Amino acid sequence: MYRFYVLIIFLLGSEFLSSQSLDDIFHKIDLKLSRDKSYLNLNYIDFLASELKDFPVEEIPRTNERDPYKFKDAENITYRLVLMLEGVGVDSTMLMFIEERRSLAAGGESFIGDAVDGPREEITRVLSFKDIYYVKNEFPEIYAALYQIYRNYRKLNEDPPQTLLGINVDNEIKTSIGIVSRDNADFLAFNRMNNFHWYMKEEKKTAGRRGADAAAKSDFRIDASFSHVSLSHEIMKFGGAIGGVEFGFLDRSQNLLPYQAMSFTAGFRTLISLSESKSDLNKALMVDARFLGRMRYDARKLSENLPFLQAEKPRLNVGTAAGADLSFTRPFQMPFLNLYFATGGVYFTKPFIKLGPAAAQYAYSTFSQGEMSFSFYWNTSDKRTTKFRMDVGAGYHDIWKSYYRANGTFSGSKELKYDKISPVLALHFNFSPANSDLLYAKARIYDSRVFAQAWIKLAEFGNGLHSFRFEGMYLTPAFARKKNDWENDGGVILQIRYRMGM
């Protein structure tokens, strides 16, 4: 098997070889495919000629002076496309050959006159590997049409095509470094499981009665908890983009629990594909953009009286600001990129939280925040039951201290207490047994504090249309440094999270 892959990889860089050397390589590959295909890690897709819509030509040219081939639209003829999926040493999926499989009725005769006792197939390799390679280089539009068979299959199926491998694989053997997708598959799986907003998903083919096994659908998509709500509707699709709105009491970047940020955030989200093909999400360059408006809000009474929030009183004022939260899928061949910023005018006149004695009060406020990070995804096995994501980057925020007179008015005196860039490191963990999203956990370290979040699915019904999760967030005290005067010792919030149509 190893020698076969070496031949394939060697052929990819064979532009300087002579035609005789190339013919020798083609002969060895086709011979290997004929004799040992059940020992090679190849996959296949069966299709009918009637499924080839808008095929660019009626006849496909072939090599070795053979006549061009034309697909036959007959009830007893199916075709099998054999592929080598992308993997170690193979950057993209390759088409290997195509077989014509003619069904012979019981009691009939084959084309050479042999009697047929039972249902059998007459198999002919109509396009060899050399034919496919020739078409790819000389007639790329024909190769693209053949490759579309594989693309259509992946749109309708999450699992890869069936395998030709005829040997038993020891599933107990574990990979030591995990499985990483070369496209957007891990990014999409993570966001479908965790994002507040909806990510579209290709529909699977369902066997049997139409719609019997299909997941339930809704024009509305809702993700709602005690601290945040997002929603979208089918009418919010426009020009290949998907829209949504959100509002809540979460802070994107700072070490603050919901309701401690002393602000209310509302915004609009849009998911845009920048690629020409809007349907192939795994290959598209996408931008998930949230445009946010943050307003000052006195949430002290809520934070002190909510039974599901146990935390010390907030000591920091968060100013009104406008911002954006952007996620990119591998821009310019880089890792997945995340950008966030929020900024607004300084406001010291009437802070919600003042500290110190009445005669000499002061307040801490933050007005600008930013963060940039790269995300890396991997799975512990090819079953993708356990998924990980790591964010590595840096964040920034400012802290101002302002002083007030005995009558509570602003004295005009202020000073910048914090104005630094600090590293950000976050690790995410997903557990999805049998393709069912069950558990999530996250730990984020920023400015020597850990923000932890986790949820577990409690119930799911309506064919997956509705689900309930139990979610918790925990903020630790500062470590490896002294506590700043504008910080408290953290706390915890527990809540129920409801999702519909996500």
Image (cartoon, rainbow, N blue to C red):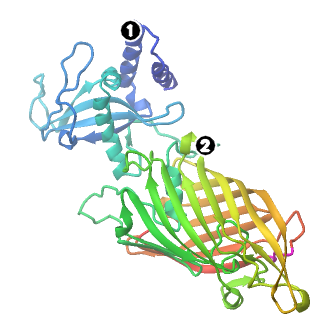
Whole-percent x, y for residue 161 in the image: 37, 43
| Rendered image quadrant of residue 17 | top left
Left or right: where 78 falls relative to 381: left
Which callout, 1 or 2, points at the residue further toward the start of the chain? 1
Residue 473 circle label: none
Q: Which amino acid does label 2 sit on?
A: Thr
Q: Is residue 367 above or below residue 29?
A: below
**For numbered disc 2, what is the local secondary structure?**
loop
Whole-percent x, y for residue 448 in the image: 81, 63
**For numbered disc 1, what is the local secondary structure?**
helix
Residue occupying image coordinates x 46% and y 35%: 92
Instruction: Check disc 2: other Cα within 10 Å, few if <14, some if 14-19, many if 20+.
Output: few
Label 2: which residue? 175
Q: Quadrant of the C terminus?
A: bottom left
Label 1: which residue? 19
| Rendered image quadrant of residue 136 | top left
| Rendered image quadrant of residue 358 | bottom right
Left or right: where 43 falls relative to 87: left
Q: Is residue 343 above or below residue 146?
A: below
Q: In this view, does 497 lie above or below 478?
A: below
One can see residue 469 in this view: no
Q: Which of label 1 and label 2 is nearer to you?
A: 1
> In the image, which residues are magenta?
485-489
Q: Is residue 159 magenta?
A: no
